[in-house]
Amino acid sequence: MTPTSPDLAPAHAFVRRPWNPHILLMVLALWLSTLGNLPLWRAMWGLTETHGLRIWLGLLGFGLIVLLATTVLLSLLVWPRWRKPAGVVLLMVAAANSYFMFTYGVVIDPTMMANTVQTDVREVRDLLSWNMLVVLALGVVLPSWWWWRQPVQKLPTRRLVGRQLGLAVLAALVLLVVVWASFQDLASNMRNHKSLRYMLNPFNTIYASTRLVVGQTAQAQMPLQPIGQDAVFASAAMVDHKPPLIVLVVGETVRAANFGLGGYTRDTTPQLRQLQGTGELAYFSNVSSCGTNTQVSVPCMFSHLGREAKAKSDIPYENLLDILQRAGMQVLWLDNQSGCKGVCDRIPNASTLELKDPALCPDGECFDEIMLRVLPERLAQLEKAGSAGPTAGTVVVLHQMGNHGPAYYKRTPADKKVYQPECRSNVLQDCPAQEIVNAYDNAVRYTDHFLAQTVRWLKTQSRPTAMLYLSDHGESLGEKGLYLHGMPYMMAPKEQTHVPMALWLSQPLQSQLGWYGACWKKQTAEPISHDHLFHSVLTLAQVKTGVQQRELDVFAACPSASR
């Protein structure tokens, strides 16, 4: 039989020809640098209103830098034995990151990575959408299918290693030249627009994951450091002392801009406003959060370190609740969220996750009022356990679901929805801006109802009581193209860091504390922050310890047995 001429070879012969492994690596680098970084390129394009020749050259230069840096990374990390699964993982990371950055305007930094690790089934469910499935299909399934099916030439190990390392060195050298040539514009952009460094796939994920693992590993190897070992209940010697009951409500994702007591155009807090009118409630209008997400803010709120010191320290310390318990108080944490982030590890705690209540827990997720439903039983169990002396008080922390997004509409019972129509999608860009605000404001108004119900319950107790409410962080609702929260603190907008704080004090507790007049309302308009919570609650709970700092006590103008 006459051999087949090369010119008459089957049409599919070229398609199935094995790839040179280094060429295939460059194809992956090109995909990741271009389509895998669409949010980055959109952000770069939007940095200036005019797009002249210099801007085009700058974009091309930055694009070349990204391609070369990605080539270096892949050349060092992706080797034949794990080439195909590594490529699929990189495609998944790039697509998922791009979707969330495009959809919500977030960036991928260590705290966002920590949020991802700490998420639960309810939060994942709220993020799922058809848009997300389409993006994953186009950005992961199809390219991964193509990547996995490609045949690759088998080169001798020595030649393959030499060429791949040579590719890495060559790309690194060219990278240095391009960076040097464009350093002025590059440095200016990175300095003035710091969010860009957290948008670069897959480097953002590698950096954030490494920081998270290293930090958690270092912290796990350190013993827990005790604080406030001198803590005592300052009113223990009082003959007529009745143990107080203090409820700390940790709010979720409520920003001060939409809180009625803070001057919002809508009265989203009508019931708290009534309490304020009686003189029993004070609203603190100028409060800054410790972080822009729950993972950072909640531990920081209960820490003695403060925001700046906490951010720099990997040392595990005891927190406010440990000190209160050491002083002889009963302490309880009730959670309607994704956990206490380690704050309640050494005190009695309970979650609403498994509760079944047809009215308050539809579809497997409970409204915040469920915590008031179970609170009396939990307190009875706490007292029965006899974990405190007869003169000690009780501190209860209620961790809300609050305004957890993006499915704000799920946070409000049907009979509490005042503002209509509301956005009923978790893809916020698909909704008109006013419908997003309506859904969010309905959830704020439900928090107002929940707090008022908490006060009503406290008024039925036979001992001095108080309620302190403080949101963990704020939220972006589309301002400047940003949604949700979690921006690095140094670049976060005020919507994510300005939070509401309210305090209700019963008359019996005011009398017990000796707080006559309005001394406890002196700092309602002053700039304060989460840093003040630790030191202020010690005063409110009448606990004395040398750890307390008077300058961070919002009740410093009042007489205090704890000082």
Image (cartoon, rainbow, N blue to C red):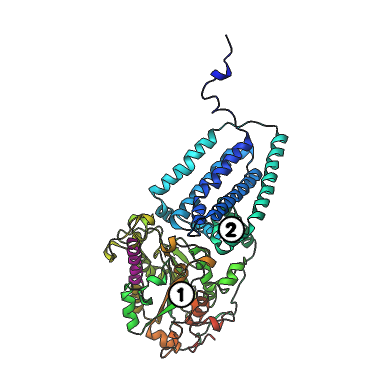
Q: Position of residue 360 (x, y in %)?
A: 32, 62
Residue type pointed to by label 2: Leu
Tell me what residue is drawn at x 40 percent, y 55 percent.
Answer: 126
**Quarter of the figure that contains the C terminus:** bottom right
The residue at the far top in this view is 1
User: Can I make out residue 160 in this image?
Assistant: yes
- The count of marks equals 2
Q: Which mark is residue 212?
A: 2
State which quadrant residue 74 falls in: top right
Q: Is residue 440 magenta?
A: yes
Q: Nearer the viewer, mark 1 or mark 2?
A: 2
Which comes sooner in the sequence, label 1 or label 2? 2
Q: What's drawn in magenta, residue-wise?
A: 434-450
Q: Regarding mark 1 in the picture, which secondary structure is present there?
A: strand
Q: Position of residue 530 (x, y in %)?
A: 50, 74
User: Can I make out residue 344 in this image?
Assistant: no
State which quadrant residue 227 falls in: bottom right
Work out how far the residue at label 1 is from the one at label 2, CA to CA, in angstroms.
Answer: 32 Å
Residue type pointed to by label 1: Val
